[in-house]
């Protein structure tokens, strides 16, 4: 009898010290607890299945506007984590209007089977508490009138880690033949996006971060209220960020004269018959205007020396307009600045516009094919639309009219610097250094091992280079190189270190080595052409500085 008492104690929350009438307990519990415990058996028990649709929303200006008027928050306590075989044992719902609590609903729910001890330890809900609680069917019929605006899709509901609670609620509704259309927001996802500086994103941690007091943690109503207060804080944070974003977006819109160029480009693309639904113009902090179709086609800039467009050399060589070399930040040795001033000049760039636009369009189609139905696609598009501007047909016509009559750049005196072509091979170099010869380098035929042994040294060296410890950084680069590590990053960091020391001979020499190893001895398909271009540009600049220092 003692062992049986212990078993009953585990199942029904009794202790050894309490007197248990076994027959009475069994009789009482069997009338309240359905012996059905498997998902299949439960499905058979309820043959009519409801149709419940759910839509997960993110915080956007539109959803925030809705939430400021009214929203519901809810929380569930359950017998476990399985949305199919486990059941709700408590449901708490709070209704907010204009940022204030106006009503609430709470009920315990008898799952019709014993609550596991592990779940009971967390939510402090016992079988004894659930014995006289309404069944799931009764609880749903009671909460339906309260939740009707949510279930009809008229008002948004929220929860923390909402997918979990939504799954339990929707499965319960389906089991009992209810149909609904639920829009919901997850405060967990919102917090991860908007809140920085917390150790984690648990509800308790976020409540502490905002100074929200939860009077009844791990119970449905207490957690629901905490979630509601958290959502109000997220709305306020979103609006602050939105104001900052609006200011940033205003700065990202090109000037009136820059938009005249944008209008010409858009007109060329429209007349070609290509889609322009995603064509946008964005001005960055360096004053370049990016022309994009999700991916950047090219950039142009209105500078003191004149107006120019940055284009790959293969395009610029065929264009009869003034040109100079692009800077390293503009793409390096594989790019040039093409100067223009009028629509007549821009007409010569039509092939460039069409070719780069078609390339971006293909890239977008590939991206859409892979990510269309994912959050990655939605987030990328949301970010893309957060800056710059699009031009309507009417705006394009007006801007094109304003931009007429400008003189061609070929009739202007630009005073552009002459490009100096230096024959690197003819430079006499006598660098003093501690680098081992290439034939002494380890792991030359095992790049993976070279990476494993050398990358940590390079990473440490680059960190202290940025701290101003240049010679110590070079010593670590030397050791990384000796271990067999080779990458554009290593040689660019070498170059920046030597540039800081004004040791141009070593800078040219190490870049010579880097370009030779990366393009011939160790061709790497993962290295982009722009990275080689940057090394070429650095070498040209270093060679120029070396010649200047020798004069």
Image (spheres, grey):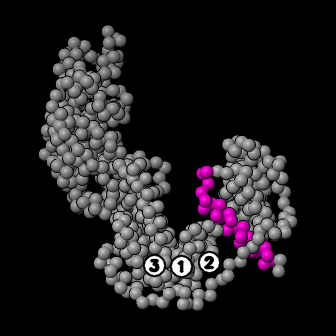
Q: Quadrant of residue 161?
A: top left
**Does residue 419 show up?**
yes
Question: What residue is pinned by disc 1?
Answer: 308
Q: Residue 250: percent from the left, percent from the top?
A: 40, 75
Question: What residue is pinned by disc 3?
Answer: 347
Q: Nearer the viewer, mark 2 or mark 3?
A: 3
Which circle's residue, 2 or 1, is located before the other in the chain? 1
Q: Quadrant of residue 383?
A: bottom left
Does the magenta segment cover residue 229? no
Residue at 26% x, 34% y is 88
Depth check: give the residue in front, 373 or 138: 373
Q: Helix, strand or loop at disc 1?
A: strand
Q: Residue 282: percent from the left, percent from the top?
A: 44, 71
Query: Badge 3 local density, few (<14 within 10 Å), some, or many (20+)?
Result: few
Residue at 58% x, 90% y is 413
Q: Is residue 528 left or right of residue 30?
A: right
Circle 2/circle 1 CB separation < 8 Å: yes
Which circle's residue, 2 or 3, is located before the other in the chain? 2
Residue at 27% x, 49% y is 55
Task: Determine the CA span between mark 3 and mark 1.
Answer: 14 Å
Q: Residue 437: percent from the left, percent from the top?
A: 84, 53
Say which quadrant the C terminus sits in.
Answer: bottom right
Q: Nearer the viewer, mark 3 or mark 1?
A: 3
- Magenta residues? 525-549
Q: Is residue 521 left or right of residue 356?
A: right
Depth check: give the residue in front, 344 or 90: 344
């Amino acid at each position: 009898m003692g062992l049986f008492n212990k078993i009953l104690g585990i199942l029904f929350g009794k202790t050894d010290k309490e007197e248990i009438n076994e027959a009475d307990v069994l009789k009482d519990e069997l009338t309240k607890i359905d012996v059905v415990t498997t998902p299949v058996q439960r499905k058979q028990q309820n043959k009519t299945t409801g149709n419940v649709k759910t839509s997960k929303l993110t915080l956007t200006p539109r959803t925030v506007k809705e939430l400021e008027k009214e929203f519901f928050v809810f929380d569930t306590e359950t017998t476990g984590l399985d949305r199919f075989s486990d059941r709700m044992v408590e449901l708490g719902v709070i209704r907010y209007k204009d940022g204030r609590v106006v009503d609430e609903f709470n009920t315990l729910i008898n799952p019709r089977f014993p609550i596991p001890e592990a779940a009971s330890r967390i939510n402090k809900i016992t079988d004894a508490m659930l014995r006289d609680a309404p069944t799931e069917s009764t609880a749903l019929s009671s909460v339906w009138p309260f939740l009707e605006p949510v279930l009809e899709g008229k008002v948004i509901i929220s929860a923390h880690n909402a997918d979990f609670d939504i799954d339990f609620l929707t499965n319960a509704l389906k089991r009992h033949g209810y149909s609904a259309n639920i829009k919901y927001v997850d405060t967990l996802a919102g917090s991860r996006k908007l809140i920085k500086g917390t150790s984690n994103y648990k509800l308790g941690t976020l409540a502490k971060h905002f100074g929200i007091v939860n009077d009844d943690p791990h119970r449905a109503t207490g957690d629901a209220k905490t979630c509601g207060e958290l959502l109000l804080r997220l709305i306020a944070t979103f609006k602050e960020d939105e104001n900052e974003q609006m200011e940033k977006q205003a700065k990202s819109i090109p000037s009136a004269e820059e938009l005249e160029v944008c209008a010409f480009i858009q007109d060329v693309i429209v007349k070609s018959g290509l889609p322009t639904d995603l064509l946008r113009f964005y001005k960055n902090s360096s004053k370049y205007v990016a022309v994009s179709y999700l991916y950047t086609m090219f950039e142009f800039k209105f500078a003191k020396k004149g107006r120019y467009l940055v284009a790959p050399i293969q395009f610029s060589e065929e264009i009869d307009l003034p040109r100079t070399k692009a800077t390293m930040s503009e793409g390096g040795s594989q790019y040039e600045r093409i100067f223009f001033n009028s629509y007549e000049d821009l007409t010569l760039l039509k092939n460039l516009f069409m070719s780069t636009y078609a390339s971006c369009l293909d890239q977008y189609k590939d991206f859409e094919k892979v990510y269309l139905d994912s959050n990655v696609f939605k987030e990328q598009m949301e970010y893309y639309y957060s800056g710059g501007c699009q031009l309507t047909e009417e705006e394009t016509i007006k801007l094109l009219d304003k931009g007429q009559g400008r003189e061609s750049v070929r009739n202007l005196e630009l005073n552009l610097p002459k490009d100096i072509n230096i024959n690197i091979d003819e430079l006499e170099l006598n660098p003093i250094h501690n680098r081992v010869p290439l034939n002494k380098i380890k792991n030359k035929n095992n790049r993976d091992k070279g990476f494993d042994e050398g990358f940590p040294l390079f990473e440490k060296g680059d960190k202290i280079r940025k701290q101003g410890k240049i010679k110590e950084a070079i010593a670590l680069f030397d050791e990384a190189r000796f271990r067999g590590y080779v990458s554009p990053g290593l040689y660019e960091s070498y170059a920046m270190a030597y540039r800081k020391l004004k040791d141009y001979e070593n800078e040219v020499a190490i870049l010579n080595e880097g370009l030779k190893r990366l393009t011939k001895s160790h061709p790497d398909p993962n290295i982009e052409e722009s990275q080689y271009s940057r090394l070429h540009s650095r070498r040209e600049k270093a060679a120029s500085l070396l010649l200047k220092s020798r004069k």
